[in-house]
Image (spheres, rainbow, N blue to C red):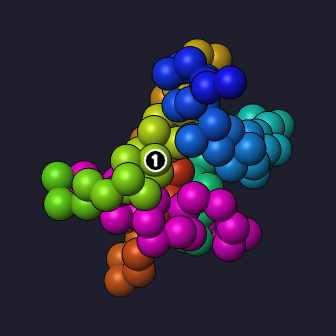
Amino acid sequence: MIYTASEARQVALDKREVYDEIAILEPLILDAIAAGALTVTIGPDSDPAVTTGFMNESVHYLAYSDPLTNRTDAHKKAVAQMNEVINHFQSLGYTVTREKVDGQNKFNWLVSW
């Protein structure tokens, strides 16, 4: 039996990776809220530095930093995955952006509320 187009997209996006990224971000956001902050930086430049997840993968960095040049299926998947993460937090009312880490093919998530 073949997947519907919608099912095929969900399988191809590897939702587990999206859920793993959300699981990295959520406790750090909750810690920042508990500390009375209104924003948090999460990634290689944060304290403590986060060394796993999309923010440390070059395919996700390249897809984010230069989406017009980086158009392979891997880059398109990375863009869709990052958009899923952003949409998850935006649906809860958070503002989510990304910033490049100087001199590295990595980025930080910036989350505010």
Q: Residue furthest front?
A: 1
Quarter of the image with the N terminus in it: top right
Say above or below: 32 vs 90: below
Q: Quadrant of residue 63?
A: bottom left
Q: Is residue 11 magenta?
A: no
Residue indicated by mark 1: 77
User: Height in image: 94 above or below 17?
Assistant: above
Q: Residues within 10 Å of mark 1 (few under 14, many from 20)?
A: some
Find residue 40 and report its horizontal and vertical position in percent: 60, 47
| Image side of residue 11 versus residue 81, left or right | right
**For the residue labelled by badge 1, is the local secondary structure a helix, a strand or a loop?**
helix
Q: Which residues are magenta?
A: 46-67
Say if 3 sits above or below 45 in the image: above
Residue 95 or 64: which is nearer the viewer? Answer: 64
Residue shown at the point (57%, 58%) measured from the top left = 54
Residue 107 seen in the current view? yes
At label 1, which amino acid type do we have?
Answer: Lys
The answer to which quarter of the image holds residue 58 is bottom left
Q: Residue at x 57, y 41 (%)?
A: 13
**86 relative to 11 in the view: left or right:** left
